[in-house]
Amino acid sequence: MASYPTPHGGASLILSFRFQKRIVLIIGGNSLAASRAFAALDADSSVVVIARGGEASVCDELKWRAQQHQLSVIDWDALPGPSSSSSSSEQDAELLEGYLSTNPYVSLVCVTDTLLSAEISQKRNKLSAEKIARVCRSRNIPVNITDLSDLCDFTFTSTHRFQDPDTGSPSPLQIGITTNGQGCRLATRLRREIISKLPKDVGRAVSKVGKLRELARADSSLESANEASISEDGAEATPNAPVPQRSAQETPQEDATRRMKWVAQVSEYWSLQRLADMSEQELADVLNGQAGLPVAQPVDSNGTASNPDHAVSLHGLSLTSTPPKGRIFLVGSGPGHPSLLTIATHSALTRHADLVLSDKLVPAAVLALIPKHVEVRIARKFPGNADGAQQELMEAGVEAARRGLTVVRLKQGDPTVYGRAGEEVLYFRAHGFEPIVVPGVTSALAGPIFAGIPVTQRGAAESFIVCTGVGRRGKEVKLPGYERSRTLVMLMGVARLPQVLVALQSEDAVSARNGPAYPPNTPIALIERGSMPDQRVIYSTLRDIVAALDSVGEQRPPGMLVIGWSIISLFGKGDMTILDDDASSSDEARLRLLLGEAKWKICEGIDEAWNLL
């Protein structure tokens, strides 16, 4: 048995009324009454305002509209009614009853004088409002009473009517939003936010579609057609429902149905900008019974249409029976701080991804940007399983892409800087997918900056070199030798720090190093979780860095090492004399400026301005 949605109540039946030749009766003369009057006038209604004291007592806008003969203002005391012995609440109800008995075209009643305002010194009490509501309901007239929701048959939405940006004239497009009494001010804000996200030409697009509908119905042969079959408002939920194939013997009914279906197709699939920009000729061409929609023309090797007399359609389609092919992006997440994502990476994660395959150490702040409906898998790169986890992710990427999904392989830093991007490019290519590699901000450059270290600086460092502390399948790598004018940036070296220090300093470690050994007093900075709020930097020397690391307890991966004299070049007043010929004799004094009399220095966190980003 079929299952249908269950109604839960509490919603509004949102309708759009037009009241030509009908009367909207407004009780009260304040600015809210003027707002209600304007909305009714905009909907082609006749408006009558009843206010104690008549025209002299209402707000300036209502006075002006009465003088312009846009509406009528009536004094309660001018209405025929009961004797003065009646109570005021009874009297108003009886006066209203008398007025409604002689004016059968009243369709809605709005009571606004239950709101105390600057223009009106007296406020209608609830008893009086209840009696007015009872009179209206006895005549089946819906009533709205301000600030008394339990007496209301309807409420007003927060409404906006769009204009043509070129002419300033009002467009047919109008939107309204309601919170069903849970937040009128919030409804106004939501209305503004919706409007701000729609293109400025959206009103004109609606006008153009309206003209299309008129043209679709314009043929006199439609007089004999079934009106329901040429309406867009029928029961079909898709504009792709089949219509009879066109033929020379097309009946008026078939012609009408086909033309209105074309209107529905255009409304559904053309961009709003395209609809707004349609010329009168294009409007006619869309519905042309002979020409139909233009088709794409063949192009030559230079991309030029082979038939220059015909423009290439924006809507020509090349149909194929093959399933859509998935895509694979290799993207860099930067050093960690979400504000350092490139726009391309942010777009891949938030707009295009169906599946995200993430490195283990990508920060939660970056993963939090991914929409909740997108599946995220984190690499299972626990110690000893790095290669197995890498293979697992690559296989998952190919499998998902074969299903037509967009796969985003999310890596730290830049994918090509020790990120195995090359291996993945070749693997995906061998399996039929050419991945798109999106660069990222590499931690090799960003990490030192967040630690206050320039990798190059005149007078301190003329070059820098980036290396890794561990090779493929865990093998040791040959490290660069010492050059006073060069900064060494080492990624993935913290876990093997003792071995790295031996390779850098030992005179016997020639096979592990290309060039001279590093002096023990060479400055080193260990940067953990660079750019993140819990960043930690340990400044020391090669001889003392192991003891410094042991002193801080638990490590904070990911970490990196920066080695060289550029580390101290921007501390305090700075030092641009490091590369002077006789400067080496002053190195111990330079280290004291960095470390004081201690053997290491620890700095926690990042600049507060970055936390704001």
Image (cartoon, helix red, strand yellow):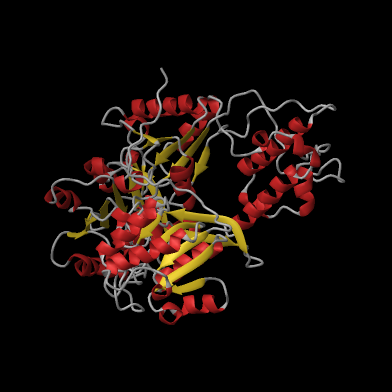
**For this rendering, which residue is in front, 201 or 405?**
201
**For this rendering, which residue is in front, 241 or 603?**
241
What's the residue at 54%, 58% (across, down)?
22
- Image coordinates of residue 122 in percent, x first then y, are 29, 76
Left or right: where does residue 321 sit relative to residue 247? left
- Image coordinates of residue 471 in percent, x first then y, are 36, 35
- Image coordinates of residue 354 in percent, x first then y, are 45, 35
Whether residue 10 is visible:
yes
- Image coordinates of residue 533 in percent, x first then y, are 26, 56
**For this rendering, which residue is in front, 547 or 39?**
39
What's the residue at 41%, 63% (across, down)?
98
Whether residue 295 is visible:
no
Left or right: where does residue 212 sit relative to residue 297? left
What's the residue at 70%, 40% (across, down)?
315
| 136 over 396 or under it: above or below | below
| 30 over 393 or under it: above or below | below
